[in-house]
């Protein structure tokens, strides 16, 4: 069985996750589910990034130790992922003992071989982003990522020889043209960061305590990004390169990350891995941001609701569907509740829900819900069947290119064709004529079988809805293999009663 290792970033623990945070995880979940469906042995990892000055400060404000603080709010991430149906295989916390020990070993190895050395750091640091910046990189003296004030820090520190790996990194990019997607992000990395010259990276701090101590010099804690990026291999058992998980799943097939952290994943992380002599991940995809009214989703602006409010109001699949369908993957997109409602109404209630409901209702009305197929075929059928059978290659191509929204739209297009097929064949008029009963049965079979195919294709995106459709169809034919043939829906089974899959939402 081929393997597929996919990761999301590990999240800063928060009591205030918004729909933008859910975006990375929903997409990663959809890709993981699609890969499982198509026969891959998938390892899908997410988790939390729990160290650093920012957390230390928040814990202080809450009157807790950092560990007490993170232990308390970590459940918020797990609860949110559960309510979104995120099917992760492993949840890593950077406060896990094995992770902390592995990071210490990584740091020591790099130090022993001379890739980490001691020096003095003088420069600018953005606490919220946990990022060091050179004077030249700042924008009007502020953090180029978040626009906030930078702190001037001066302290004894360890440095990683990033500069040593600059040429090797460029060569790796050249030899692996798909390493960074979309391509625009690769050009940004090359032109803005690598070609102007990589500077050695400060990888330890002494001015706060909440981090993994450097074991041979414990007044230092490991820079939080070195700690965080290592999660992708420590979870697999690294530095034990013989561990079963590491052997099986590394290198990662896909690190899915937001665009603002592409830099860490495509410069610092590959250079660390080259220094460790560990193979590099196959791909890093930097997706765009969800925005609200064209601007940042921000706690200080108070412009968002807890995503669970949308899930409770419209259902988990409506929220998943919206995140996956609305935004061309890679670009920024705007989030609004009105657009979520409109998308749910058009695609999920009208196109999908209505089709399933009216098809199963007709089968009950005209045949007591018993599926038969006397195969009274007409040319109209061929067109529908061909478009259903073509979906396999189309969806595969789109998913391999990570064009999730386009894959979904192709499935929707077939569902729209099914609705048109009903309008063209007018089953209700055939039902009035006893001699047309066989033709009517074939039409309904074709519709039910098309719905079965589409429900399988939709299962990575809206798994709860697909499961309901399989239950209504009363079918066991839900595997990917069954899609190479039109006609695998069982005959003479009795359909269950249709449910309303998506209630139309009144916009007011
Ligand atoms: O960056 N739209 O964690 P994080 C889309 N701990 N995606 C968004 C978003 C938005 N409005 N807001 C946040 C970190 N995200 C580090 C990662 S990995 C070794 C360490 C995405 O909690 C963001 O782009 O700030 C990132 O992919 C994810 O949420 C976690 O962000």
Image: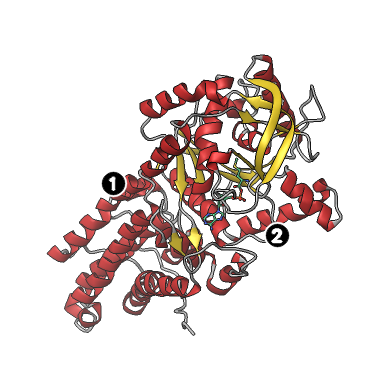
Image point 37% across, 27% down: which residue?
174
Q: Which residue is more in the foreground, 288 or 489?
A: 288
For residue 271, which numbered disc appears in the image? Answer: none
Q: Which residue is mark 2?
A: 15
Q: Residues within 10 Å of mark 1 (few under 14, many from 20)?
A: few
Q: Residues within 10 Å of mark 2 (few under 14, many from 20)?
A: few
- Say if 363 sits above or below 242 in the image: below
Q: Quadrant of the N terminus?
A: top left
Q: Is mark 2 within 8 Å of ligand 1?
A: no
Quarter of image, res 222: top right
Residue 102 shows in the view: no
The mark that comes first in sequence, 2 or 1, is 2
Q: Which label lies toward us, 2 or 1?
A: 2
The spot of residue 236 in percent (x, y) is: 62, 31
Image point 59% across, 65% down: which residue?
307
- Say if 493 sits above or below 77 in the image: below
Distance CA(mark 2)–CA(mark 1): 42 Å
């Amino acid at each position: 069985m081929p393997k597929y290792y996919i990761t999301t970033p590990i999240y800063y623990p928060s009591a205030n996750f918004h729909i933008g945070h859910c975006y990375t995880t929903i997409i990663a979940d959809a890709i993981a589910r699609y890969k499982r469906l198509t026969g891959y042995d998938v390892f899908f990892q997410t988790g939390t990034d729990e160290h650093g000055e920012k957390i230390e400060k928040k814990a202080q404000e809450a009157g807790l130790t950092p560990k007490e603080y993170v232990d308390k709010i970590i459940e918020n991430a797990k609860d949110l992922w559960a309510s979104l149906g995120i099917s992760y295989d492993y949840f890593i916390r950077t406060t896990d003992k094995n992770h902390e020990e592995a990071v210490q070993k990584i740091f020591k190895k790099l130090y022993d071989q001379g890739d980490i050395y001691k020096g003095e750091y003088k420069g600018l640091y953005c606490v919220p982003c946990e990022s060091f910046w050179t004077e030249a990189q700042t924008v009007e003296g502020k953090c180029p990522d978040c626009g906030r004030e930078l702190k001037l820090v001066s302290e004894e520190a360890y440095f990683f020889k990033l500069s040593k790996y600059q040429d090797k990194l460029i060569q790796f990019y050249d030899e692996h043209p798909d390493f960074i997607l979309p391509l625009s992000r690769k050009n940004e990395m090359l032109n803005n960061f690598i070609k102007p010259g990589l500077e050695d990276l400060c990888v330890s701090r002494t001015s706060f305590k909440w981090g993994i101590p450097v074991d041979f010099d414990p007044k230092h804690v490991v820079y939080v990004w070195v700690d965080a990026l290592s999660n992708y291999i420590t979870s697999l058992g690294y530095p034990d390169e013989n561990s079963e998980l590491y052997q099986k799943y590394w290198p990662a097939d896909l690190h899915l990350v937001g665009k603002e952290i592409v830099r860490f994943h495509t410069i610092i992380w590959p250079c660390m891995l080259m220094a460790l002599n560990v193979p590099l991940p196959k791909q890093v995809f930097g997706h765009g941001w969800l925005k609200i009214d064209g601007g940042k989703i921000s706690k200080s602006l108070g412009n968002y609701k807890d995503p669970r409010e949308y899930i409770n109001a419209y259902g988990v699949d409506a929220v998943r569907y919206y995140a996956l369908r609305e935004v061309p993957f890679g670009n920024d997109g705007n989030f609004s509740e009105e657009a979520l409602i409109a998308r749910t109404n058009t695609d999920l209630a009208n196109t999908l829900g209505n089709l399933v409901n009216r098809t199963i209702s007709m089968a009950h009305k005209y045949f007591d819900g018993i599926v038969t197929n006397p195969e009274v075929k007409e040319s109209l059928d061929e067109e529908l069947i061909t478009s259903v059978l073509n979906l396999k290659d189309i969806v595969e191509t789109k998913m391999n290119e990570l064009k999730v929204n386009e894959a979904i739209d192709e499935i929707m297009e077939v569902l729209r064709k099914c609705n048109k097929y009903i309008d063209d064949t007018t089953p209700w008029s055939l039902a009035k004529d006893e001699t047309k009963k066989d033709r009517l049965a074939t039409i309904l079979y074709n519709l039910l079988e098309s719905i079965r195919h589409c429900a399988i294709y939709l299962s990575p995106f809206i798994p709860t809805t697909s499961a309901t459709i399989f239950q209504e169809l009363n079918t066991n034919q839900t595997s990917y293999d069954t899609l190479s043939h039109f006609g695998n829906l069982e005959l003479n089974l009795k359909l269950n009663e249709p449910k309303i899959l998506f209630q139309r939402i009144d916009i007011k």
